[in-house]
Image: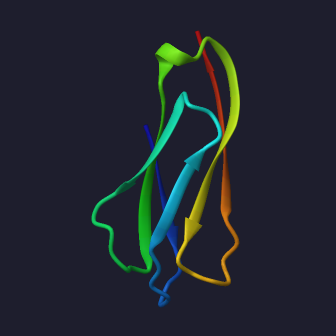
């Protein structure tokens, strides 16, 4: 798994959704679901569901109204 930190110093926010474009990739919040100026997410690729190259995205939506969805590219080569 890969952990990513999203931050907005001095501007607390909450992650409202995590969506993977591919069922072989999962994303989850790490830690409590609370307002904070930093949030951590974990992205994991299921090697049983991928054989060869993988190119997809995970989309993160936050409670910050001015923040557009954050699209994170996920690239892997398994097999």
Residue situated in front as seen by the camera: 2 or 32: 32
The answer to which image quadrant residue 74 occupies is top right
Please name the residue shown 50% across and 88% down the image: 11
Residue 31, how many percent across, how many down? 29, 61
> On screen, 23 above or below 27?
above
Question: Can you say which quadrant of the picture contains the C terminus?
Answer: top right
> On screen, 56 above or below 53?
below
Judge from the rendering whether residue 35 lies leftward or rightward of residue 65; answer left or right: left
Question: Can you say which quadrant of the picture contains the N terminus?
Answer: top left
Please name the residue shown 54% across and 27% down the image: 24
Q: Pick out the residue farthest to the left.
A: 32
Colour basis: rainbow
Residue 39, how many percent across, how many down? 42, 67
> On screen, 53 above or below 44?
above
Residue 12, how many percent across, how many down? 45, 84
> On screen, 48 above or below 61?
above
Please name the residue shown 52% across and 54% down the image: 18
Number of numbered discs on residues: 0
Q: Pick out the residue farthest to the bottom.
A: 10
Residue 71, how many percent across, how many down? 68, 55
Please name the residue shown 47% across and 90% down the image: 10
């Amino acid at each position: 798994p890969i952990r990513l930190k999203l931050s907005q110093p001095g501007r607390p926010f909450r992650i409202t959704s995590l969506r993977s474009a591919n069922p072989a990739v999962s994303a989850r919040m790490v830690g409590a679901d609370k307002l904070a100026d930093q949030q951590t997410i974990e992205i994991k690729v299921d090697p049983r569901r991928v054989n060869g190259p993988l190119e997809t995205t995970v989309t993160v939506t936050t409670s910050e109204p001015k923040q557009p969805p954050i699209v994170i590219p996920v690239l892997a080569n398994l097999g």
